[in-house]
Amino acid sequence: MPAWLRRKKAPAVPKAEQPQELWQDEEPSAESAEEHAGSPAQPVFDQEPAEPLLSVRGVERSFDVGAAKLRVLKGIDLDLYPRQLIMLRGRSGSGKTTLMNLMGGLDTPTKGTIHFRGRPFHDWNDDRRTEVRRRDIGFIFQAFALMPLLSAYENVELSLRMAGLPRSEWKARVTSCLELVGLGKRMHHRPFELSGGEQQRVAIAKAIAHRPSLLLADEPTAELDSQMAAQVMAVFREIVARENVTICMTTHDPTILEVADHVYEMVDGVFVANR
Ligand SMILES: Nc1ncnc2c1ncn2[C@@H]1O[C@H](COP(=O)(O)OP(=O)(O)OP(=O)(O)O)[C@@H](O)[C@H]1O
């Protein structure tokens, strides 16, 4: 684990400590950093506010499999606060994705409550949850989910279009997001012209473009080699520091756990430890 990648208070990855090769051909620009640091749209919390961003209480989720009931989550409690990087760790089948789907409002629990910024996701219908999701939650998946015929720029722009942001804001926001993930010079490349790590960074830019307060990432480094995974984790720390986002991600990779503010270990649908 390189020293520059270890967990720190914001800014978690100080520029001076980042090795030059972090971005193979470029670094996020100084202007971009200043723009992010000074923007009134990105308030900075000096202390953890009392109210969690997301609160999960006594959550259970079962699925009907033929005549049987499969109990996947068996009583989960979890609070996510603003500006945290949280990891869920556990073996395949332990229930991580099932929990992420519930946190992102893609599914509802069989039992228990989920409040996202005070809104009762467990009670709301899909339309209401979708509306909140569209505005305030971003998703990143293992496979990068980019449109293959669109450039990096157009892929990020598409997410702003879908989020309903005014057209006049698109160019500045797309550019600053791609610079933030170190792809300012590759904006007009299409996915097949980018490496796996670069494609994942486009997916990150796309997921944060509409300024969500929660970013959910399911195994975002699973398809990447260790150097690319480290780049993605550095981008995550940078985003938490600059964009006022909480990131919750699942992983199998023990080498990246030190980057997290908290790690929750899941075994068979319950948390067995956290640090
Ligand atoms: N819709 C569903 N219907 C039936 N079973 C399901 C459904 N969704 C998940 N499961 C089951 O729930 C269990 C947990 O799945 P989940 O995808 O949450 O695990 P995971 O920890 O994310 O695993 P992985 O690391 O492999 O992605 C698995 O046994 C899975 O087959």
Image: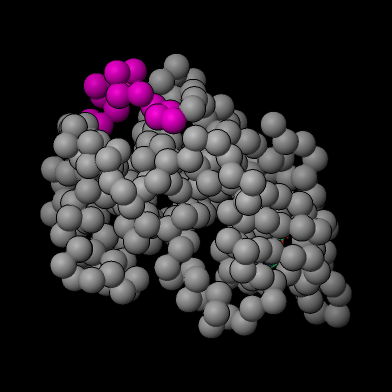
Q: Is residue 37 left or right of residue 43?
A: left
Q: Is residue 109 above or below residue 247?
A: below
Picture quarter with ligand 1: bottom right
Residue at horizontal 71%, vertical 50%? Answer: 78
Above or below, comparing residue 140 to residue 159 in the picture: above
Q: Quadrant of the C terminus?
A: top right
268 left or right of 46 in image: right
Find residue 224 and report its horizontal and vertical position in percent. Answer: 41, 40
Looking at the rendering, the stretch of residues picked out in magenta corresponds to: 10-24
Find out whether residue 114 is within the magenta segment. Answer: no
Observer-nearest of 42 and 18 = 42
User: Splitting the image into 4 quarters, where does residue 265 fall?
Assistant: top right
For the view shown, which residue lies furthest in the right direction?
68
Q: Quadrant of residue 155?
A: bottom left
| Residue at the image point whose x is 33% and y is 52% from the top | 41
* Residue 62 in view in this figure: no
Q: Is residue 20 a member of the stretch shown in magenta?
A: yes
Q: Position of residue 106 (x, y in %)?
A: 58, 70
